[in-house]
């Protein structure tokens, strides 16, 4: 529970950049990249693409986008946890509700529901994690590849 609370406190105390939202279209990615003066790389794969944006503070977010243009997964690493309310969008409430169940005192935060998977771990200045919507992950993509 302490780990989950520490992560949530970190979110409230640090104003993170805006990212594309899980389950939504990706129109905001270019605007985010320009506003933050960040680097954006797009890697095209069969059936999906990965848009990687690196913020000046060293936080890297990879957004997994289906051929229909929907964000089905996000992964991050960096000195702080990005704003999960922005990354998860409407799924943030699902994440919060799942955190109400007992969690281990130490170790990663893991949320697995029918509609949402969130896994994250780390320590001060070294966080990483991923979130994805199992129903939107392309059938030919292994969920382990979202990282």
Image: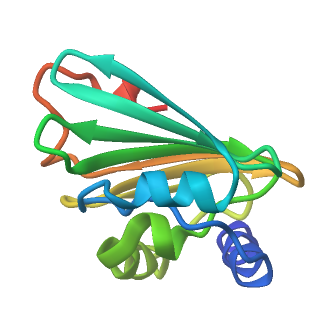
Q: Residue at x 10, y 27 (%)?
A: 139
Q: Position of residue 133 (x, y in %)?
A: 25, 52
Q: How is the image coloured?
A: rainbow
In this view of the protein, which residue sits in the foreground, 9 or 64? 64
Q: Position of residue 7 (x, y in %)?
A: 70, 69
In this view of the protein, which residue sits in the foreground, 73 or 111? 73
Q: Position of residue 75 (x, y in %)?
A: 51, 42
Q: Position of residue 57 (x, y in %)?
A: 83, 51
Q: Residue at x 67, y 46 (%)?
A: 38
Using residue 23 as the reference point, say whether residue 84 is left or right of it.
right
Q: Residue at x 55, y 67 (%)?
A: 18
Is residue 109 at least partly visible in the picture? no
Using residue 84 as the reference point, say whether residue 112 is left or right of it.
left
Above-or-below relation of 34 to 134: below
Q: Residue at x 53, y 68 (%)?
A: 84
- Residue lying furthest right in this view? 124
Using residue 28 as the reference point, say whether residue 106 is left or right of it.
right
Q: How many marks?
A: 0
Above-or-below relation of 80 to 146: below
In this view of the protein, which residue sits in the foreground, 80 or 20? 20
Above-or-below relation of 44 to 122: above
Q: Image quarter for residue 27?
A: bottom left
Using residue 139 as the reference point, say whether residue 105 is left or right of it.
right
Q: What is the quadrant of the N terminus in the image? A: bottom right
Is residue 57 at least partly visible in the picture? yes
């Amino acid at each position: 529970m302490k780990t989950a609370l520490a992560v949530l406190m970190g979110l409230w105390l640090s104003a993170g950049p805006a990212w594309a939202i899980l389950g939504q279209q990706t129109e905001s990615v270019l605007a985010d990249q320009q506003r933050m003066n960040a680097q954006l790389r797009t890697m095209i794969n069969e059936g999906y693409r990965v848009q990687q944006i690196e913020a000046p503070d060293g936080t890297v977010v990879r957004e997994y986008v289906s051929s229909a243009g929907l964000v089905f997964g996000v992964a991050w690493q960096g000195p702080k946890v990005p704003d999960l309310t922005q990354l998860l969008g409407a799924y943030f409430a699902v994440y919060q509700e799942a955190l109400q169940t007992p969690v281990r005192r130490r170790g990663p935060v893991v949320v697995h529901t029918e509609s949402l998977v969130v896994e994250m771990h780390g320590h001060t200045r070294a966080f990483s994690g991923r979130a994805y919507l199992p129903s939107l992950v392309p059938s030919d993509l292994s969920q382990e590849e979202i990282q």
